[in-house]
Amino acid sequence: MRISSGMMFDAGATGITRQTAALLKVQQQLASGRRVLTPGDDPVAASRALDVSQANDVVTQFAGNQVAANAALGLEDVKLEYAGELLQRVNELAIQAGGVAGNAAGRKAVATELRGIYDQLLGIANTKDEAGNYMFGGYMSNTVPFGGSIDSLIAGGEIVYQGDEGQRRLQVSSGRQIAISDSGLDIFRRIPNGNGYFTTGYAAGNTGTAAIGAGSVNDPAAWSASPAKNVDVRFTVAAGVTTYDLVDTATGKSLLTGVAPPTAVGNQRSYTNGQLINFKSQGAEPAFDLGGSVAISGNPANGDSFNIAPATTQSVFATVAKLIGALESGGMTPAALTKYSSDIGAAFTGNAQALNHIVGARSRVGTRMNEIEAAQTMSGDLSLQYQQTLSELQDVDFATAVTELTRRQAGLEAAQRSFLRISQLSLFNSL
């Protein structure tokens, strides 16, 4: 085979170029810290690295959502904590109100502070987050959730809720969306009144000094099963003896006799001051059991009555407003003071329900925050695992790469020196 000078020069240049390219590739690997610079370097590793990188990007997005969700729930928790502190103060003021029944100035001072607390609670319910959205408006984040005047609530009205029942959510993991807000309807409006089972009422025409407590249910199953849930406790005072009847207002019949009143005094129960009224049949009475009882203290007048009715719901604002209304009622007669005492007691019980409701809401928020914390831990572990896998697939082994760099340098130098020697060969040098 004849080898021309052109072939020698071309072969030498090709060899030098090949060695230079190989050397440059090793230099790029060392500079970038990556073994796989292009998919062609290792197609299998490049394909796996792409899958792992995409999975890591998803985890990174979830991690960002977790931070945002935790911040939103943290802000809600702070607001609910402050609301709970305000309701604790309402409890203290309700107790204080019981001690200033006959002191007009004292009642006014307590009512003034309660009006301030009412405004603060309304401010919390209508608060905005850092993005300018109303926190407790549901999906209607641009609408003021709560409206209405306190005077309408004192008169027996209810707060107006202008939001909806939606809960904004964020995806915090591949299989979990978590609520980052709560409807104001659930937090501030749907609070059981009374003792949670029934409420107690004071007839407007009462003239005696008897007051009724909040009552309690010791057998929830009996309460649920009983058809009689709206009952009047009606008093009769005759010849210095006080008795009472229990009347189912739905049927108009006495629970003690099974017939419509008037019930003969001999068929009524006797009453003593501070007596516990059990809503359960005794002796020869027709069988009935509401599963609860209520305490009545004081001296009722003839014809006085009290009512128990199934509990419904009311807002925390209505609870505070009713306490303000009792303080501002102004009556100082024995009957008025008795009613005042009953209203204060009912407001105290209602506020306790509101406070428990807020505590329960905070507990649910805390549970979600704990779940997010667990998701953050898992996301951190997954991200670390993905990064380790990517490192194994892509990163360069520096010891091997430095050795390869030295070898490529030696090969390039050899190619250059040999080409220089060969390029100098000539027949004329031998003549």
Image (spheres, rainbow, N blue to C red):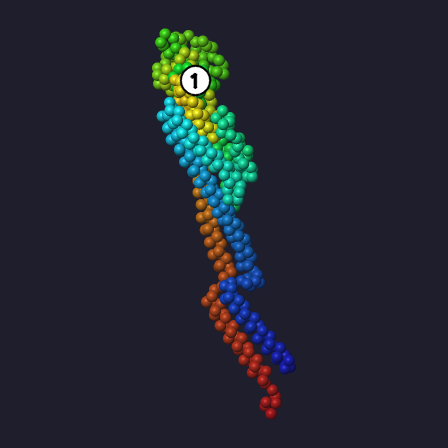
Please say if 431 is above or below 104: below
Point out residue 30 in the picture as x, y percentages from the top left corner. 50, 66
Which quadrant is the N terminus positioned in? bottom right
Give the residue furthest to the front.
105
Specify the quadrant of the image occupied by residue 424.
Answer: bottom right
Q: Is residue 105 left or right of residue 424?
A: left
Point out residue 227 in the picture as x, y percentages from the top left corner. 47, 19
Q: Residue at x 52, y 49 (%)?
A: 61
Specify the quadrant of the image occupied by residue 426.
Answer: bottom right
Q: Residue at x 51, y 40 (%)?
A: 128
Which quadrant is the C terminus positioned in? bottom right
Q: Residue at x 40, y 18 (%)?
A: 333
Q: How many marks?
A: 1
Please say if 2 is above or below 314: below
Point out residue 415 in the picture as x, y percentages from the top left corner. 55, 77
Who is closer to the viewer here, 18 or 326? 326
Point out residue 293 in the picture as x, y percentages from the top left corner. 40, 20
Q: Residue at x 41, y 36 (%)?
A: 85
Residue tagged 1: 306
Type of amino acid at the residue the image marks with label 1: Phe
Who is closer to the viewer here, 75 or 52? 75
